[in-house]
Amino acid sequence: MSGPARAGLFVYAVDATRVARFYQNVVGMEILHEREDLIVLQSPDIQLLVHKIPAAIANGISIEVPPIRRENTALKFFFTVQSLDSARNSAGEYNGEIFNETWDGPGFIACNGIDPEGNVFQIREGV
């Protein structure tokens, strides 16, 4: 990857490694930096910083398998992928899900999914 991404997003996670591996493998991000409490991933479009929630807080959070959707949030992010089907096929392998319902946007097809901790996001495939 050449140069820093022009946009970024922090995601706080109980299991930062699991969440980072999901985005790395499902949406094709590259790991730039990794330490115990932070994993930095990047695509040509965005940098994603997966920050481990401190144990004192994380101990009070229960993550179900499969994850329960966390829809009560003010933000939802999206990623552009080469293939919705490929992302959908690999999501379950990494403890998340890409939903089957799709819709058309201007120049893309989109659908929603959840990561291993239930964070809702969208993926888009260009048409």
Image (tube, rainbow, N blue to C red):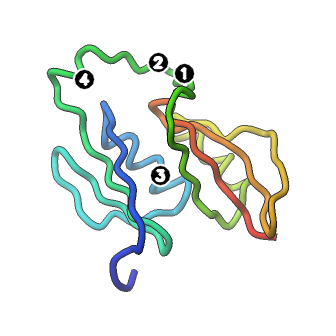
Under mark 2, the amino acid is Glu
Q: Which mark is residue 23?
A: 3
Residue 117: image location, x then y, percent: 45, 31
Crowd rating for badge 1 (residues with CA inside 10 Å; few <14, some 14–19, many 20+): some
Q: Which mark is residue 64?
A: 2
Q: Which mark is residue 58?
A: 4
Residue at (30, 30) in percent of width and height = 14
Residue at (24, 39) in percent of width and height = 52
User: The N terminus lies in which quarter of the figure?
Assistant: bottom left
State the separation of the CA atoms marked 1 and 4: 16 Å
Residue at (41, 21) in percent of width and height = 63
Compared across the picture, whether 64 is left or right of 114 comes to left
Q: Viewer-nearest of labels 3 and 1?
A: 1
Disc 2 and disc 3 in contact, CB within 8 angstroms: no
Find numbered disc 4 in the image and state the secondary structure of the residue it sits on: helix
Is 96 above or below relative to 28? above
State the separation of the CA atoms marked 2 and 3: 18 Å
Disc 2 and disc 1 in contact, CB within 8 angstroms: yes
Find numbered disc 1 in the image and state the secondary structure of the residue it sits on: loop
Residue 69: image location, x then y, percent: 56, 26
State the separation of the CA atoms marked 3 and 1: 18 Å
User: The C terminus lies in which quarter of the figure?
Assistant: bottom right
State the separation of the CA atoms marked 2 and 1: 6 Å
**Front position in the image: 66 or 69:** 69
Under mark 4, the amino acid is Ala
Is 68 above or below relative to 13? above
Residue most toward the front?
74
Is 113 above or below relative to 60? below
Residue named by callout 1: 68
Disc 1 and disc 4 in contact, CB within 8 angstroms: no
Residue 87: image location, x then y, percent: 64, 52
